[in-house]
Image: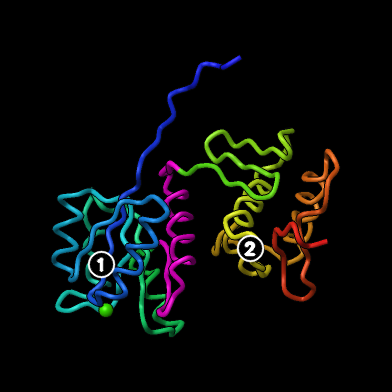
Amino acid sequence: MLEPQMAKKVMTPHILIVEDEPPQAELLKYNLEKEGYRTSLAEDGETALRLVAEDDPDLVVLDWMLPHLSGIEVCQRLRGQKKTKTLPVIMVTARGEEGDRVRGLEVGADDYMVKPYSPKEMVARVQAVLRRAGVVQATDRLEYDNVTLDMTTHKVTRDGKPIHLGPTEFRLLQVLLERPAQVFSRDLLLDRVWGRDIYVEDRTVDVHIGRLRKALNTHGGENLIRTIRGVGYSIDSEAY
Ligand code: CA
């Protein structure tokens, strides 16, 4: 029997790409649109500010080095206005200095990426920042092997059977499922799951991974969480 469907909030998040190098902008636009995002493009800071005001994007990918008005200045102006104070911003730069990273985050960027970056990694960051900002995406379900994670209902199943997870294990699984077979270091997991501002020991990651592994095997089945000694963890059905 079909159950009545709840009206689900399905939307297409709109990403403003601010980038003065067309090939870079096109590559990112292509990858974001492939994931179901709507995009618009600004080649300089002034245009970026105008498009933010006109189009009300959900997130801005902001290049640091722009003609005239720099990315830093654009970010500062966005943060200085009531309407755009909390607009998610991912700052991008060709420079990799730790000082730049700190400065980018100081002016209020939500995340920071160094060029050259992988478009897939950028898409993952965009998803993560949007989720933190409470923007629900049309693609709200992650699936891998026989595991599904529904980000709207916060339900996890394996082989159709419910898996009960604590909030930390849920978040861990979500991060792992976003990039199946990718090995995540403990540091990266700490950053993604707990956030960079909180001090958590590496050992804590191991404890929660252990709980997640156990929960996923509630109804039996292969172990899906792979341990790569001295490196980290991944979700991988080819693991054993
Ligand atoms: Ca540039």
Rate crowding at label 2 as few (under 14), some (14 to 19) or many (20 or more) other CA atoms within 10 Å: many
Pointer 1 residue: 18
Give me the residue at 49% from left, 60% from top: 124
The quadrant the C terminus occupies is bottom right
Q: Secondary structure at mark 1?
A: strand
- The image shows residue 153, relative to residue 1, as above or below, that is below
Residue at 37% across, 64% down:
90
Q: x, y (%) of residue 69? A: 17, 74
**Residue type, label 2:** Leu
Find residue 155 and report its image quarter.
top right
Q: Is residue 86 in view?
A: no
- Tell me: is circle 2 under 8 Å from ligand 1: no
Q: Position of residue 202 (x, y in %)?
A: 72, 67
Q: Which residue is mark 2?
A: 189
Q: Is residue 172 left or right of residue 213?
A: left
**Horizontal side, residue 50 vs residue 19: left or right:** left
Q: Determine which quarter of the picture holds residue 65.
A: bottom left
Q: Give the x, y percent position of residue 3.
A: 56, 16
- Residue range highlighted in magenta: 110-138
**Secondary-structure class at tag 2:** helix
Residue type, label 1: Val
90 on left or right of 22 = right
